[in-house]
Structure formats: structure tokens, C-alpha cells
Image (spheres, rainbow, N blue to C red):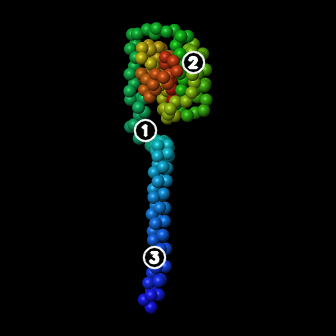
């Protein structure tokens, strides 16, 4: 009887060992897949979740946390005169409100005011609540004149844009929701 019991144990143990080894391999594969998924999709999912949170925030919460662009507004000096005429001032028009065609229609308005359009495109964000005029160093007077021409109150040095993003333009106009 002892020999039959030891024979049964010998037959069961390889299956038990194989099951444990297969389970460990599957667990390691699962961890590897999870790490790869987080590395590939983590930031886009985080951005999407942040956007969903911003859209569902109450109006009071939105008033308490204004956009970063609005916090750093520095009006240009009013006494300085623009060095460039309107026909020499180039403008980059960016859609910052997410409404299809907003930058293109604003670009037409900017052109009718006499400015040169450097390019029209989309801003990195589409949650600008208000339009903002940004300028490269040395062109604050041109930005102030442009803001007056387009009835825009927010004028700021480059905030969130780099010089190379301007594509040679002197002024960037981000079209906001209001």
C-alpha cells in the first residue's frame, strides 16, 4: 500500500509544480503588460481624465482657479510706440477654444485689419476661456495695438509658447471662448 501511495504522490507532484510555475510566469507577464500599458497610455489617460474633471467642475470652482495665462498678464508699456506698421506685423492665429474654424475666421478678421498672417492653427490647449494676445520680446507695443484693434483685454509675453512656435510671427493671438 505504501508503494501505491508514493506512486500517486509522484504522479501528482509534477502537475502541482508545473501549475505553480505556469502561474508565476503568467503573473510576471501580467505585470509586464501593466507596466507597458501605463508607460504608453498613462499620460494621455491622465490628460483625458483632467479634461473631464475640468468640464464637470462647477462654475464657482472655475472662477477660483483661472487659467494660467490669465494669472500672468503683464500689460505692455502704453508710452512705447510700435516700431512696425500693421502691414509689417505678422500674427500667428491659434484656436484655443476647440470650436472648428474659429482660428480661420479670426484670421480673416485679422487680415482685414491690415495685419500679415504668419499661420493659422490650433493651440496646444482648447480650454482658453478668453482670447489672449502674446508677443515675442521687443514687440509689446505692436501687441498692445493689435489687442486694441481686436478688442482683446489680455496681453501677455509668451506664456506656453516658445519663440520657434511663433513661426517668425511677432504676435500670437489665441482665440478663446469669450
Residue 157 vs residue 105: left or right?
A: left
Q: Earlier in the sequence, mark 1 or mark 3?
A: 3
Q: Name, please, the residue furthest toward the bottom.
A: 1
Quarter of the figure with residue 60: top left
Q: CA distance from mark 1 to mark 3?
A: 64 Å
Task: Give residue 89's position: percent from left, percent from top.
Answer: 52, 13
Residue under label 2: 117
Contact (Cβ within 8 Å) of mark 2 with mark 1: no
Q: Quadrant of the N terminus?
A: bottom left
Up the image or down, 110 lies above or below 30; here it is above
Left or right, 144 with reference to 98:
left
Q: Can you identify the residue that label 1 sits on? A: 62
Where disc 3 sits, the SS reads helix
- Earlier along the polypeptide chain: callout 3 or callout 2? 3
Q: Residue at x 39, y 10 (%)?
A: 79
Identity of the residue drawn at 57% across and 18% down: 117
Dot 1: element: helix
- Residue 102: x and y in percent read 58, 28
Give the residue drawn at x 48%, y 78%: 12
Measuring from the top left, give residue 82's x and y in whole percent.
46, 10
- Using the image, tell me which numbered label, if any, was put on residue 76: none
**Res. 144 visible in picture:** no
Name the residue nearer the viewer: 147 or 165.
165
- 145 or 28, which is in the foreground? 28
In the figure, is residue 102 to the left or right of 138?
right
Q: Which mark is residue 13?
A: 3
Q: What element does badge 2 sit on?
A: strand
Amino acid at each position: 500500500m505504501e508503494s501505491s501511495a508514493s506512486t500517486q504522490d509522484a504522479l501528482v507532484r509534477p502537475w502541482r509544480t508545473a501549475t505553480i510555475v505556469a502561474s508565476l510566469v503568467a503573473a510576471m507577464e501580467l505585470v509586464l503588460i501593466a507596466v507597458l500599458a501605463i508607460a504608453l497610455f498613462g499620460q494621455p489617460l491622465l490628460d483625458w481624465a483632467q479634461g473631464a474633471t475640468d468640464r464637470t467642475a462647477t462654475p464657482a470652482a472655475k472662477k477660483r482657479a483661472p487659467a494660467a495665462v490669465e494669472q500672468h498678464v503683464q500689460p505692455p508699456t502704453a508710452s512705447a510706440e510700435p516700431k512696425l506698421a500693421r502691414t509689417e506685423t505678422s500674427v500667428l492665429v491659434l484656436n484655443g477654444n476647440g470650436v472648428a474654424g474659429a482660428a480661420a475666421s479670426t484670421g480673416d478678421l485679422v487680415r482685414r485689419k491690415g495685419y500679415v498672417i504668419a499661420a493659422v492653427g490650433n493651440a496646444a490647449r482648447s480650454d482658453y476661456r478668453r482670447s489672449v494676445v502674446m508677443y515675442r520680446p521687443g514687440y509689446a507695443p505692436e501687441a498692445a495695438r493689435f489687442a486694441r484693434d481686436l478688442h482683446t483685454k489680455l496681453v501677455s509675453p509668451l506664456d506656453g509658447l516658445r519663440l520657434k512656435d511663433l513661426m517668425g510671427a511677432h504676435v500670437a493671438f489665441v482665440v478663446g471662448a469669450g
